[in-house]
């Protein structure tokens, strides 16, 4: 009897978190994305984030931060571009641009994640992705992705989080194909 009382809340939690969208829809696609034949993924913009968050850092720390955010930008752009090239199938002549901005990044503490666990030291990365009609420059859709940085890999976990954020963007396109 005791096992069943513990099992039900755990199953309910798994069910409800499994139904959650992997992104926050700020503007539903209008017109629908499936009316577009191709997408041009523009370079990820992290300039505003760097300007707003780097004043207090020393030069060495600033350069490390810039390198990490540039790596994240490249990973996200490449993965979304590859997914669209391999999966998007539409013969429409309409084109759209995909603009991705890095809004927030906190690497957290890999040591705290490893030695303490239980959520200690977790970080996050937040992106905003906008789909804009290439010809009219009208906003078609906008989503926000807040990807936690968890795990115990002493640094590599942030790259897994960047990759997971890109997969969430891919999921958005798949959901709207």
Image (cartoon, rainbow, N blue to C red):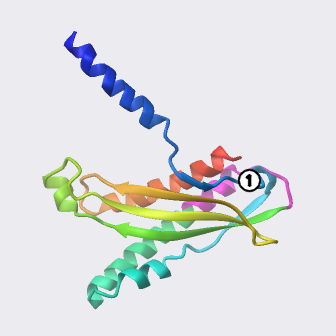
User: Residue 41 appears at what percent x and percent y?
Assistant: 64, 67
Question: Residue at horizontal 74%, vertical 53%?
Answer: 33
Q: Main secondary structure of the magenta part?
A: helix
User: Residue 16 appears at what percent x and percent y?
Assistant: 44, 33
Q: Tell me if residue 52 is in the magenta stretch.
A: no
Quadrant in which residue 140 is drawn? bottom right
User: Residue 22 appears at what percent x and percent y?
Assistant: 50, 47
User: Circle 1 — which element?
Assistant: helix
Q: Which residues are magenta?
A: 79-93
Quadrant in which residue 153 is drawn? bottom left
The image quadrant where one finds the N terminus is: top left
Query: Relative to residue 81, is residue 1 depicted above or below?
Result: above
In the depicted view, which residue is nearer to us: 132 or 78? Answer: 132
Identity of the residue furthest to the front in this view: 26
Q: Is residue 116 left or right of residue 121?
A: left
Question: Residue at horizontal 49%, vertical 77%?
Answer: 46
Disc 1 target residue: 33
Question: Residue at horizontal 38%, vertical 26%?
Answer: 12
């Amino acid at each position: 009897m005791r096992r069943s009382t513990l099992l039900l809340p755990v199953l309910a939690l798994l069910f409800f978190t499994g139904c959650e969208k992997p992104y926050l829809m700020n503007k539903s696609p209008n017109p629908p994305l499936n009316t577009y034949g191709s997408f041009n993924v523009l370079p990820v913009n992290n300039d505003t984030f760097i300007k707003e968050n780097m004043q207090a850092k020393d030069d060495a720390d600033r350069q490390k931060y810039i390198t990490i955010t540039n790596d994240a930008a490249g990973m996200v752009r490449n993965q979304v571009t590859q997914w669209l090239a391999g999966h998007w199938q539409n013969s429409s002549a309409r084109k759209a641009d995909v603009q991705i901005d890095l809004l927030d990044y906190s690497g957290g503490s890999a040591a705290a994640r490893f030695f303490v666990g239980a959520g200690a030291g977790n970080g996050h990365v937040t992106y905003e992705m906008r789909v804009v009609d290439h010809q009219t420059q009208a906003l078609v859709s906008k989503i926000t992705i807040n990807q936690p940085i968890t795990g115990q890999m002493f640094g590599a976990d942030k790259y897994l989080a960047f990759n997971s954020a890109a997969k969430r963007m891919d999921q958005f396109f798949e959901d709207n194909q």
